[in-house]
Amino acid sequence: MTKLKIAVIGLGRIGEMHLKNLLKLPELFQVTGIADPARDDLKHLADQYRIPHYSRDYHDLLAQEDVESVLIASATDTHAQIIHDAAEADKDILCEKPIDTDVNRIKELLSFVKGAGVKLQVGFNRRFDHNFLQIKKYVTDGKLGTPQIVKISSRDPELPSLDYVKHSGGLFFDMMIHDLDLIRYLSGSEVKEVTAKGAVLVNPKIGELGDIDTAIVTLKFANGALGVIDNSRQAVYGYDQRAEVFGNKGMAKADNDRNSTVELDCKDSTSLDKMPYFFIDRYQGAYLNELVAFHDTVTENKPLIANGEDGLRAVQLAAACQQSLESGQTVQLNY
């Protein structure tokens, strides 16, 4: 099996998670570089994991012949430029969402990437989750018939830092964008209109920054189906991740994963084990699966499961949600 030589750009919480996951797949990947402008311990990490190249400037990695591909996990507002530079350097790319928050810039970038002839996979890890993959299979196989209602609940266990909120692009672009992608994926249809409602119910300081912490979006699909997404920045009981597709032949739903399947039944009570507390635990398998898929796309030319067009559609939907929230009106989408 061909090993893919890859560098990780951006080593915050999610970047370091990706690095560790790549190291768990030594038969598929060789990590040949790491870069992050804010890390003082790059040499230590490089020595610890026997990584030959490290730099605060990602351009140094793009110049290396033994860097064939890059995983971009840097701040959102740096993604587009790094994708451009990586494509220009003839490196295949796996980039965390979103590509950018500007639709026109994404379109220009996708055209450039296509011209460069490199692969671009967007990090919509939920497409690779074992539960949601099973629902997708039921939809594709026709077991549910024609989808009529698609519902997703996605609620974080704790608020992000206010500094994070300042640079996140807002709840629709940062948090719900995963659900907007997933609902397209599960429904098998494009979204034609959205209506968004939002509120600040958890922390008023988020509102002072111009964002919301709670949202419900209703969607209408090209095939006539309806969808609902609800988000909250704080679910005190854990990382709440559920999805359902209802069709004219049946229904498939995915409940939360839990630390065990044990149910405790006593005389006066029933209890279940806790659900995972945050996304790294909940989607551990999905993150590994997306790396395997990226490897297979680059080395075996298999189709991309989450490509640049998917990244564009998710941002278009997030922008439409923001427009609907601000205007109080339903927004039509014309791709």
Image: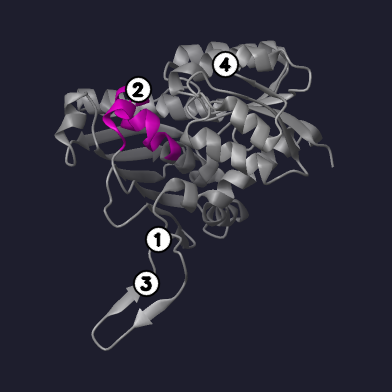
Q: Earlier in the sequence, mark 4 or mark 1?
A: 4
**In front here: 149 or 2?**
2
- Neighbor class of circle 4 (other Cα within 10 Å; few <14, some 14-19, many 20+) is many
Residue at image position (35%, 22%) is 167
Give x and y (percent) for residue 219: 35, 38
Q: Earlier in the sequence, mark 2 or mark 3?
A: 2
Kindly identify which residue carries mark 2. 167
* Residue 76 appears anywhere in the view: yes
Q: Is residue 118 left or right of residue 223?
A: right
Q: Is residue 273 left or right of residue 230?
A: right
Q: Is residue 231 above or below residue 141?
A: above
Q: Is residue 4 left or right of residue 211?
A: right
Give x and y (percent) for residue 321: 32, 29
- Give the Cα distance between marks 4 and 2: 17 Å
- Give the Cα distance between marks 4 and 1: 36 Å
Give x and y (percent) for residue 125: 54, 41
Residue at image position (48%, 31%) is 12
For the residue marked with disc 2, what is the amino acid? His
Q: Is residue 111 above or below residue 188?
A: above
For the residue marked with disc 3, what is the amino acid? Leu
- Give the Cα distance between marks 1 and 2: 29 Å
Q: Earlier in the sequence, mark 4 or mark 2?
A: 4
- Neighbor class of circle 3 (other Cα within 10 Å; few <14, some 14-19, many 20+) is few
Residue 82: image tag: 4
Kindly identify which residue carries mark 3. 272
For the residue marked with disc 1, what is the amino acid? Met
- Give the Cα distance between marks 2 and 3: 37 Å
Q: Is residue 334 above or below residue 124?
A: above
- Neighbor class of circle 1 (other Cα within 10 Å; few <14, some 14-19, many 20+) is some
**In front here: 286 or 186?**
286
